[in-house]
Image: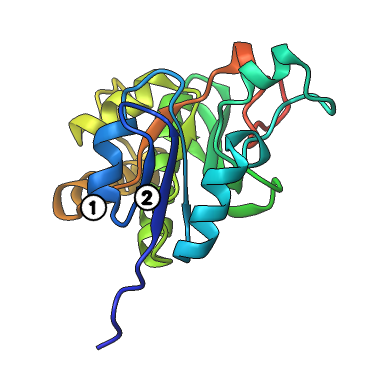
Amino acid sequence: MKSKKTKYYVVWEGKTKGIFSSWDECKQYVLGVAGAKYKSFSSKEEAEQAYQEGWMKYYRTAEKERTPQTIENAAYIEESICVDAACSGNPGQMEYKGVYTKTGEILFHFGPALGTNNIGEFLAIVHALAFLKQHGKDWPIYSDSQTAIKWVKAKKVNTSLIRNKDTERVWQLIERAEQWLKHNDYNNPILKWETDRWGEIKADFGRK
């Protein structure tokens, strides 16, 4: 059996600052903490160097130059997945995708299929969770849908979408996603993308 590779977590800003050797230890100092700055590294040496260099080198801003204002707004984590959905109508033809936040590379895409935007956002988050678990990564997931985040945490979709032959495909995906959430544990933080501070989410379909 392959041994799990140890990761080191740097916390620059949080309840406690420092370097930690497990996510379980790190998360108690950063999750739910406004302005928390943290990142994982594959070796202790990298973590120690990053801790000394400071968080600004590892956080991205929406601007090319780091002014005091853009530094303050540089709060999203590049090593993460951003998800988004698009839907023409409600219900309508829905699709979703997940991208690597740092580069915008598309990691997965689904659709179109008849559904709603919130359902697409929900499915995208669960798809990202399954993707990251498969690849052994503890990256955060960003979504700009508070409703979808709420559904994921409840492990249940609360939708009025009628189930019929046209929506059966999406309903099957919903049920599969709900079952995945009930039978899988994960440590990935699911975070709200702050559009007002960072601009459109990196997975945005650009159809507004």
Q: Secondary structure at mark 2?
A: helix
Residue located at (48% from left, 34% from top) = 142
- Asked if residue 183 lies left or right of residue 88, the reply is left
- Asked if residue 173 lies left or right of residue 92, the reply is left
Residue located at (53% from left, 27% from top) = 92
Return the x and y of residue 24 as percentages of the image width and height. 23, 48
- Asked if residue 149 lies left or right of residue 97, the reply is left
In this view, the residue farthest toward the bottom is 1
Q: Secondary structure at mark 1?
A: helix
Q: Is residue 29 above or below residue 133?
A: above
Residue located at (32% from left, 36% from top) = 164
Q: Amino acid at mark 1?
A: Trp
Q: Is residue 125 above or below residue 158?
A: below
Residue tagged 1: 180
Q: Amino acid at mark 2?
A: Leu
Question: Mark 1 and mark 2 in contact (Cβ < 8 Å)?
Answer: yes
* Quadrant hosting residue 73: top right
Return the x and y of residue 41 as percentages of the image width and height. 49, 58
Residue tagged 2: 129
Decide which of 77, 108 is in the foreground and name it.
77
Quadrant of the image containing the N terminus: bottom left
In this view, the residue farthest toward the right is 64
Q: Which mark is nearer the camera, 2 or 1?
A: 2
Return the x and y of residue 36 as percentages of the image width and height. 43, 27
In this view, the residue farthest toward the front is 52
- Tally of marks: 2
**Could you give the CA–CA distance between mark 2 and mark 1, rounded to whole angstroms?**
10 Å
Q: What colour scheme was applied to this rendering of the protein?
A: rainbow
- Asked if residue 74 lies left or right of residue 165, the reply is right
Q: Is residue 31 above or below residue 187?
A: above
**Residue 163, visible in the rendered structure:** yes
Which circle's residue, 2 or 1, is located before the other in the chain?
Answer: 2
